[in-house]
Structures are given as C-alpha cells and as structure tokens.
Image (cartoon, grey):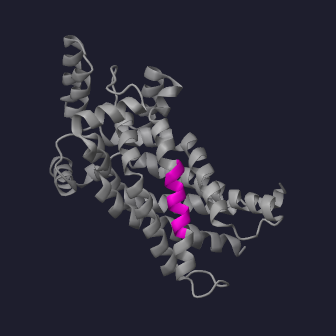
Amino acid sequence: MAVNNFHLNDFMAGWIGGASSVVVGHPLDTVKTRLQAGKGYQNMTHCMLSIYRKETVAGFFKGMSFPVATIAAYNSLVFGFFSNAQRFISKYRYGDGRHACSKLDLTVASMLTGLVSVGVGAPVDLVKIRLQMQTQTPLLTENFQLAGGVSGESNMVMRVAHSSSQTLYRGPVHCISSILQAEGLQGLYRGGGAMVLRDVPGYVLYFLPYTVFCDLLRPDAASNPHPCAIWLAGGLAGSISWVTATPSDVVKSRMQADAGPHRKYRSVANCILHSYKTEGVQVFFRGASVNAIRGFPMSATMFLAYELSLQFLGSF
C-alpha cells in the first residue's frame, strides 16, 4: 500500500474525541458497571441513588483519571485504524484510497478495528472496572466465599474490606502493579475473550449506522454533514451499538471485576453458564437502559469532536 494513504490526522482527532467522550460518559459508565457486576441494585435509579448516598457525587467519577489518560489513546487507535483501514481497502479494491467504501468495506474495516482495539482496550477496561468496583465490599467477600476461601483468608478479606479506606488499590498505577504481581501480564487481559465478542460486532454496529445516518441527514452527496447531523448520527449509532453489545458487555464486566485469589469464573463460557443458572437470562440485559442513555451523549460527543478536529487539522 502507498504510504500517502496513511493519515496521522485521524489518530490525533480520535484522541481529542476520546478525551471529550470520557468526561461526558463516565458517570453513567460507573452506574453501568455497578449494575452489571455489583450486587444489591434493583434498577438504574436505585443504583444512582445508592452511589450518591454512600459516596456522594465523587462516587460517579471513580476511576476516571485512568480513562481520561488512556481512553483518548484508545480512541485514537480505534478511529485512526478504522479510517486508515478504509483507505487501504479502497486502494486495494478500487485502486484509489479516496474511493467511497461500500457497506461491505465498512463492515470489514469495523470488524478489524474491533479485533485490534482489544489489545489496548482490555487492560484499560480492566483497571477502570477494578477501580469502579472498589467500594463493592459485599461483592468482594461474596466472590471469596463462593470460591471456597478458607476461614483465615476470608477474615483477612473482610478486615481489608471494612477498613477505613475500603479500597484495594490506591490508584491506576498501583492497580496495574498489583495485577501484574498477582497474575502476570495475562491478568491484564482477563475478560479479553468476552471483549472480542463485544467489540467485533459492536464496532460494525457503531461505524455502519453512523455512516448510514450521516448519509441520510446530509443535504446532498457532495456536501459535508452539518455538525448537528454528526451529533445526532453519532448518538444514535452509539445507542444502537451499546444496547446490542450489552450481553457480552455483562460477561466482560463480570470477568474483569472477578478479583481475588479465588475466581468464580474460569472462562467466558463458564461465566455465561454460571450467570444464567443463578440469575436467569435477564442477567445478560443488566445495564441495557444505562447503555442506551449513556451511549447517545458519549458517542455524539465522540463523533462530533472527531469530525470537527479532523476538519481543523486538515485546514493546516
């Protein structure tokens, strides 16, 4: 492939869009994680009230520093790879990297993006979820007891969980260090298989609807979509993608929140079967409403910031 088909602006614009989307979406992301992997929450409203009463507003921003620092880089990879993949596919199929991609081309580029994104996204999600779940004392002790922890070890966990700080990790760096020491590098990729199941189809249902909605909302084929159209198309695409990805997202969240020396879940299949047997099929749709609500403003902000940044960078 020709080198001039590779554009760095897409990576830079993706970084800006990613940082913007984290600020908008993180509070509801915390609610989503607690609903999917925590215990004792009846619904989204009850979860939000519980977090606020026990942890105040700061509870909604648990683990945010790490996503702000890393999701920007993650989205830089996602949008940069996706846009350049489209150009490479067009160059290969049509001889011109600027040729418009077909729906099949977009599907292939989206699937490849989802696969590549797991390499960076799995550790980022793992650390974020571990930090978000720190105050979930009942979950940590229940995981230990269900896994058959011995009395002395269980008492130790209870003492740690009920300490004044009620935290296992002092921050993102300490979290990563603890995971590496206890589980090695593979520990950072726990839940990676579930993330592949989520992101490969998830990105197809992210980029494809966005492109379709943008085409429908633009005044004519030759003009660029209006910022309002970009915002609406991005929001709708985000809601569609996140709602359909909820079942695999539940499995991923549960596996990544499954901390401690003894695991409840041995594999993705084991997590699915265990969750189904103990809580029924409805467990796989926990957080769907949060995903639908959260997906709109987060993705709308992501796409709008990305497109506007791309236009700005292209003006130089």
- Residue 231 counted in the magenta span: no
Residue displayed at 81% across by 67% down:
96
Residue displayed at 19% across by 53% down:
43
Residue 4 x/y as whole percent: 82, 61
Residue 71 x/y as whole percent: 50, 51
Would residue 312 be found to the left or right of residue 214 on screen? right
- Residue 206 counted in the magenta span: yes
Residue 27 x/y as whole percent: 32, 56
Q: Main secondary structure of the magenta part?
A: helix
Residue displayed at 37% across by 47% down:
247
Magenta residues span: 200-210
Q: Where 307 sits versus 92, above or below?
A: below
Would residue 30 be found to the left or right of residue 316 on screen? left
246 or 182, which is in the foreground?
246
Q: Quadrant of the N terminus?
A: bottom right
97 or 280, which is in the foreground?
280
Residue 307 in view in this figure: yes
Outermost residue toward the bottom in this view: 219
Which of the 4 image quadrants contains residue 238? bottom left
Which of the 4 image quadrants contains residue 76? bottom right
Would residue 299 be found to the left or right of residue 57 on screen? right
